Image (tube, helix red, strand yellow):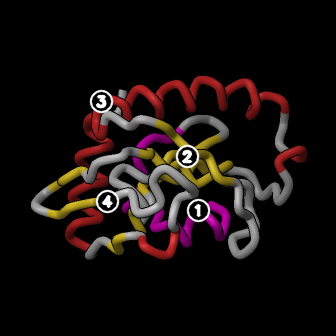
Amino acid sequence: MNPTIEKFGYPTTLIREYEHWLVLLRPEQVTLGSLVLAAKSDARAWGDLPSEAFAEQSEVIAAIERNLRDFVQYEKINYLMLMMVDPNVHFHVIPRYSQFRRWNGVDFPDSGWPGQPQLASAIHLSRAQLKALSEERRTNFR
């Protein structure tokens, strides 16, 4: 796996693997259910991905949106491609909502609602929380 995927906690955070993409739980939860959609290749530019990756991406995004709709009932969803620090192709997937969500006794507000997501206000999950949420999402990802 490329360094970007490893930085986001692979394999612990793996939710679903596809031929060209991985869906990972984002260790810092900007909002509840925040994910990383990471290309498995070493590409450092979106345009360098093979055409098959673009075709598969539509299937992956549809699955992500179904899963997050069921899990957090998001009102909007943001896909951020921020490859400034982590160079391999990836998107931060941030479900957005106007009222906080609760998981396992922890409140997850959307601090930026209705504006831009506030990445700096993300909730950093403990190792145990990260494992539990990853396993729950992996089990329920359809």
Instruction: Name the quadrant containing residue 140.
Output: top left
Q: Nearer the viewer, residue 36 or 29?
A: 29
Q: Earlier in the sequence, mark 3 or mark 1?
A: 1
Q: Is residue 51 above or below residue 88?
A: above
Q: CA distance from mark 4 to mark 1?
A: 26 Å
Q: Nearer the viewer, residue 128 or 97?
A: 97
Residue 137 coordinates in the image, percent (x, y): 30, 44
Disc assigned to residue 22:
2
The residue beneath circle 3 is: 70
Residue 118 coordinates in the image, percent (x, y): 51, 66
Q: Earlier in the sequence, mark 4 or mark 1?
A: 1
Q: CA distance from mark 2 to mark 4?
A: 26 Å
Indicate the secondary structure of the residue bearing disc 1.
helix
Q: CA distance from mark 3 to mark 1?
A: 25 Å
Q: Residue at x 71, y 75 (%)?
A: 85
Q: Circles 1 and 2: CB distance less than 8 Å? A: yes
Name which residue type carries label 4. Pro
Disc assigned to residue 24:
none
Viewed as shown, does residue 16 lie left or right of 79? left
Residue 44 coordinates in the image, percent (x, y): 82, 60
Question: Which residue extends farthest left?
Answer: 105
Q: Which residues are magenta?
A: 1-17
Which numbered disc, 2 or 4, marks the residue closer to the eye? 4
Q: Residue at x 55, y 54 (%)?
A: 115
Q: Residue at x 41, y 63 (%)?
A: 111
Which numbered disc, 4 or 1, marks the residue closer to the eye? 4
Residue 14 forms part of the magenta stretch? yes
